[in-house]
Image: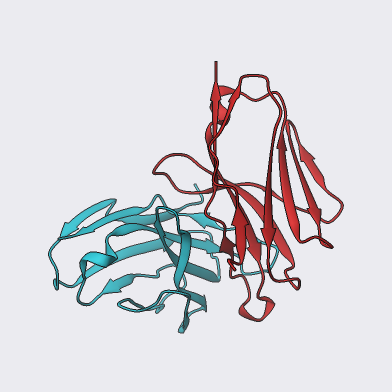
């Protein structure tokens, strides 16, 4: 079983739609969670951290469910510029400091 | 500007010819790491360093070497590149705490023929 699993998509949605991605992780001791965004052939960029209480940043909402070991990302009012690959990221190994494990990514395509 | 700088951006080389990909960060970060990204496999960690002179293997270290003689630099060395090392490589750094995200370099697209 992969440490971090995501639906690869692609998710094809019209502008203005609401779209949600889920991600599951295998190590129940994981402490830190993130969503990164990656545009084609470019470096991943931190979109947002995911906190236990859930957090929101504009049109983006992230949720953590520790009992079920999954993380979600909700994007409201999708824009063309949201088209990218979204990477679910987990820090499962406290003993290795800041080692992050990346999911393979979910592709989002927003169309006009 | 806070950044991680990788060079070169693109490299085509032949099997067996030693090469080095440089990585430098100007944020005084303690933690640095190398990843490779392949289609369908996502980002996989090659090596990481928690501080100067402290390096350790990640998930796919075979065929790679690193060094951390200075805090800002973390070069990736391929002593004898092979075609299966053709990939997109990213260097990343962070402050080192478990809640810190990474800042990535722009990537190096390596082709070994």
| In front of the other: B4 or A38 | A38
Q: Is residue B22 above or below residue B54?
A: above
Instruction: Give me the residue at 47% from left, 39% from top.
Output: A39
> At which x and y percent is residue A60?
72, 36
| In front of the other: B34 or A28 | A28
Residue projecting furthest to the front: A1
| In front of the other: A5 or A71 | A5
Q: Chain A colour? A: red
Instruction: Give me the residue at 65% from left, 25% from top.
Output: A78
| In front of the other: B105 or A68 | A68
Q: Is residue B14 left or right of residue A104?
A: left
Instruction: Give me the residue at 40% from left, 52% from top.
Output: B39
Q: Quadrant of residue B101?
A: bottom right
Give the quadrant of the C terminus of chain B: bottom left
Q: Which chain is cyan?
A: B
> At which x and y percent is residue A45?
54, 47
Q: Quadrant of residue A62?
A: top right
Instruction: Give me the residue at 47% from left, 82% from top.
Output: B56
């Amino acid at each position: 079983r992969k440490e971090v699993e995501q639906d690869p998509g692609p998710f094809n949605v019209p502008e203005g739609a609401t779209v949600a991605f889920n991600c599951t992780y295998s190590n129940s001791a994981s402490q830190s969670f993130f969503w990164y965004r990656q545009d084609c052939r470019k470096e991943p960029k931190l979109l947002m951290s995911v906190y236990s209480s859930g957090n929101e940043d504009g049109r983006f909402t992230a949720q953590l469910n520790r009992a079920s070991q999954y993380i979600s990302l909700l994007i409201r009012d999708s824009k063309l510029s949201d088209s990218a690959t979204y990477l679910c990221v987990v820090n499962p190994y406290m003993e290795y400091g800041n080692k992050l494990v990346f999911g393979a990514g979910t592709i989002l395509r927003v169309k006009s | 500007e806070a950044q991680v700088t990788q060079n070169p951006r693109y490299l085509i080389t032949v099997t067996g010819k030693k090469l080095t990909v440089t990585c430098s960060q100007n944020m005084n970060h303690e933690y640095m790491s190398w990843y490779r990204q392949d289609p369908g496999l996502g980002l996989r960690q090659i090596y990481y360093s928690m501080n100067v002179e402290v390096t350790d293997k990640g998930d796919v270290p075979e065929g790679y070497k690193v060094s951390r003689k200075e805090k800002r630099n973390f070069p990736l060395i391929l002593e004898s590149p092979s075609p299966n090392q053709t990939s997109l490589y990213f260097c990343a750094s962070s402050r080192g705490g478990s809640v810190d995200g990474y800042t990535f370099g722009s990537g190096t697209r390596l082709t070994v023929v």
